[in-house]
Image: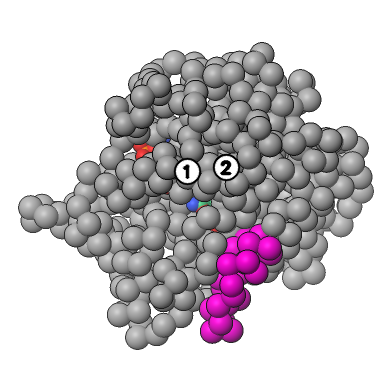
Amino acid sequence: MEDLNTRYSTEGDFLQAVGEVVPSLVPVLDRHPEFIEAGILERIVEPERILQFRVSWMDDDGKVHVNRGYRINFNGSIGPYKGGLRFHPSVNLGVLKFLAFEQVFKNSLTGLPIGGGKGGSDFDPRGRTDAEVMRFCQAFMSELYRHIGPDTDVPAGDIGVGGREIGYMFGMYRKLTNTFAGILTGRGMEYGGSLIRPEATGYGAVYFADEMAKAAGKTIEDATCLVSGSGNVAQYTIEKLLDLGARPVTVSDSSGWIHDPAGIDREKLAWIKDLKNVRRGRVSEYAQQFSGSTYHETDRSASSNPLWAVKADCAFPSATQNELLGPDAQNLVNNGCWLVSEGANMPTDPNGQSVFREHGVLYGPGKAANAGGVAVSALEMSQASQRLSWSREEVDARLRGIMQNIHRESAAAAKEYGFGNDLLHGANIAGFLKVARSMVAQGVV
Ligand code: NDP
Ligand code: 2IT
């Protein structure tokens, strides 16, 4: 950590992600001196390759813009690099390195043959027309296409990259290479996508919550639930919560959040999907649409987010990293919250994690709880290479099985290495072991 802190002192999110894993590995390295001899720890924190490129594009008024594009091939020892693309103004190398590092462990946990990668750009899609987004996606792919392939690296969506962007990028890849190949996941059903991929991250986060609750002799049925975000992950988290009889009462976006004490039902959820996916509006409109709900603007300089101070049983942070800090975790605990399942990547900071640990909150860390998205991406890759498509029921049953398995293996690893019921340590260890063994087997490369 000392070496990393010096070398990468400006990459705070990356240092935080590594810092959350290293303590879990201490007892593992004690038991496996071969990992120390093979320099696994020193190697696993360095990306195998980082690509950075210029993305030049023209807006609707003919003005030229330049953004930075990235793809990180973090660790390919158990399969082709796999992980999303994020388009958001906050994207930089430190953010993408944190996401790619997490992805290595997450992808290993799915039990499927996928290595870890991540990429994206500091392009801001907000307020851009479809034509501008298309030109940006085409410009981005006009460089990325040389570096990806079904057996090399298979990107997908993340913040700011959904079905529309995947479609535009796939079209450009096909034109440039004259091949129809499974080089992106999250594709439309008409051109090689998988049923349940759009739903998978949110559904998976709720399946994981269900597993945690059951293992503790509890249930999320009738539970009041806080959800942050209003994008892909948040929408399908709410949908699955409704399926299981829970009561979601909040959503948010980067401007503010909504509290709807009556509960967000299916009709309101359909309205949110249209607002965010079609009209691309702001959640503030919800309060005008549905009486009894309230809108609160987010104060970015505040040390806590009042969304997490709403009284509830369970929390599903599903927006972005470090959106749930120590004081937020304390507010949740004070109000009796007993379960947190992370749809987002690294939404809870280390202080928040300590509060959950101290108070015995059932805590599903992102790399375990949100692994359903990438797991179904891997199922999309399998279907694409077989040129077959599986039914909704089959993919959903596999997703459910994978989430159960991740829970079981993380819990078992925690116990085996002396961390009790701590799923954060357990997920880190279970994810690490498969990658570390593969790296040892493949020699010093
Ligand atoms: P979307 O772009 O669909 O939605 C993101 C949501 O989070 C929007 O409501 C957005 O608000 C809000 N948000 C984004 N950045 C911030 C910010 N800095 N502060 C507050 N709110 C913010 O992305 P996804 O739903 O796909 O991703 C959400 C999280 O889930 C991310 O952490 C992502 O890495 C993670 N994830 C996604 C997976 C997937 O399959 N898509 C898989 C696993 C994890 P606004 O509308 O204002 O931009
Ligand atoms: O963080 C993630 O796991 C994702 N954004 C999904 C990655 C993928 O390849 O489906």
Query: Residue under circle 1?
Result: 266
Q: Which kind of residue does numbered mark 2 sit on?
A: Leu
Say if residue 346 shows up in the picture: yes
Image position, residue 98 (x, y; %): 55, 44
* Total labels drawn: 2
Give the crowd class for mark 2: few <14, some 14-19, many >=20 residues within 10 Å. Answer: some
**Residue at image coords 41%, 75%:** 190
Q: Which kind of residue does numbered mark 1 sit on?
A: Arg
Q: Residue 95 colored magenta? A: no
Q: Nearer the viewer, residue 106 or 386?
A: 386
Q: Which mark is residue 388?
A: none
Say if residue 352 shows up in the picture: no
Q: Quadrant of ligand 1?
A: top left
Q: Quick check: 31 left or right of 125?
A: right
Image position, residue 351 (x, y; %): 64, 23
**Residue at image coords 64%, 44%:** 244
Image position, residue 50 (x, y; %): 48, 58
Q: Which residues are drawn in magenta?
A: 375-399
**Discs 2, 1 touching: Cβ within 8 Å:** yes
375 in relation to 218, above or below = below
Q: Secondary structure at mark 1?
A: helix
Image position, residue 405 (x, y; %): 77, 55
The part of the image, by quadrant, that contains residue 81 is bottom right
Q: Which mark is residue 242?
A: 2
Q: Residue 397 colored magenta? A: yes
Q: Nearer the viewer, residue 206 or 421?
A: 206
User: What main secondary structure does the magenta stretch of the protein show?
Assistant: helix
